[in-house]
Amino acid sequence: MIKTILVTLVAGVNLLAQTPAPAKKSATTTTRKPAAATSPRSLLHPELLKAKAPEVYKVTFTTTKGDFVIEVHRDWAPNGADRFYNLVKNGFFTDASFFRAISGFMVQFGISPNPAISNAWKTANLQDDPVKESNKRGYLTFAMTSMPNSRTTQMFINLADNPRLDASGFAPIGMVIEGIDVVDKLYTGYGEGAPQGAGPDQQQITEHGKPYLDKSFPQLDSIKFAKITFPVAAPTAHPAVKKPATASSTAKPTAK
């Protein structure tokens, strides 16, 4: 297991995760199929999730504390904005926990509750974006290590103005425009993560997923789901089905 180096207190640690061996079934065991939202096949293939994001888009997070809305500006950090867009579209954040929450500093998330998905994304590194906006309160930024181009899926929301992070290359991609009070209420009681503090160990999260957090850190808040709420996707067009005219029928205009 190789552990990457932290560049600052907020830097995300990307650990090499191993997919756990499947549990043995007994004759009386009922196998439950995981929810599609938490483990879609698309999330096992990061190389295929390369859609370009809109220039401005909004994402609504529904969490255990309520809803908040992020507005993303692609011109701030295009590589990061595109990655976030693809993660949200494919349900990456469903059931993911806010595993590192430090009062007066930031709240971090972005490790999948599914170890297989974490393993798939561990080397899906992004090219760095230049820092165009400062890490202000409510701004959303990708976590990274001291190595160049080390961003993958971990992100944080600044709980205070943190301009010292700008010089280290932490490039915000968007900001909370609604529900900052919800972000402020996310549980911070565990503090810094292991081994520096008493909070969750990121290696354990990547290897064992949400069961590890539910058992050892039950008070952590989590994301129920996140979805793109602007721009609204156009509905799929279906061709109108024409019914054969009859002598008794009355023709009406067809709305298109």
Image (cartoon, rainbow, N blue to C red):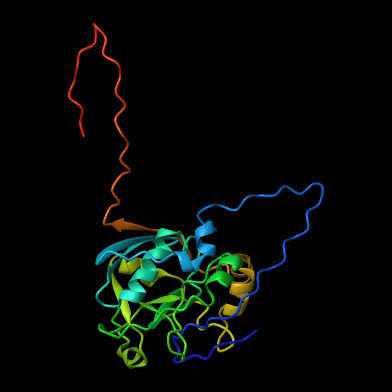
Residue 153 against residue 231 in the figure, above or below: below
How far from the left and from the top, in percent, is residue 147? 46, 90
Q: Is residue 17 above or below residue 60?
A: below
Considering every residue shown, the one lying at the far left of the view is 253
Kindly identify the residue that appears in the image at 42 percent across and 78 percent down.
Answer: 126
Q: Is residue 73 above or below residue 167?
A: above
Quarter of the image with the C terminus in it:
top left
Which residue: 28% across, 52% down? Answer: 232
Closer-to-camera residue (133/119): 119
Task: State left or right for residue 211 relative to residue 95.
Answer: right
Q: Position of residue 151 (x, y in %)?
A: 44, 80
Asked if residue 201 shows in the view, the reply is no
- Name the residue: 36% across, 64% down: 51
Q: Quadrant of residue 249?
A: top left
Direction top: furthest residue: 247
Q: Nearer the viewer, residue 78 or 64?
A: 78
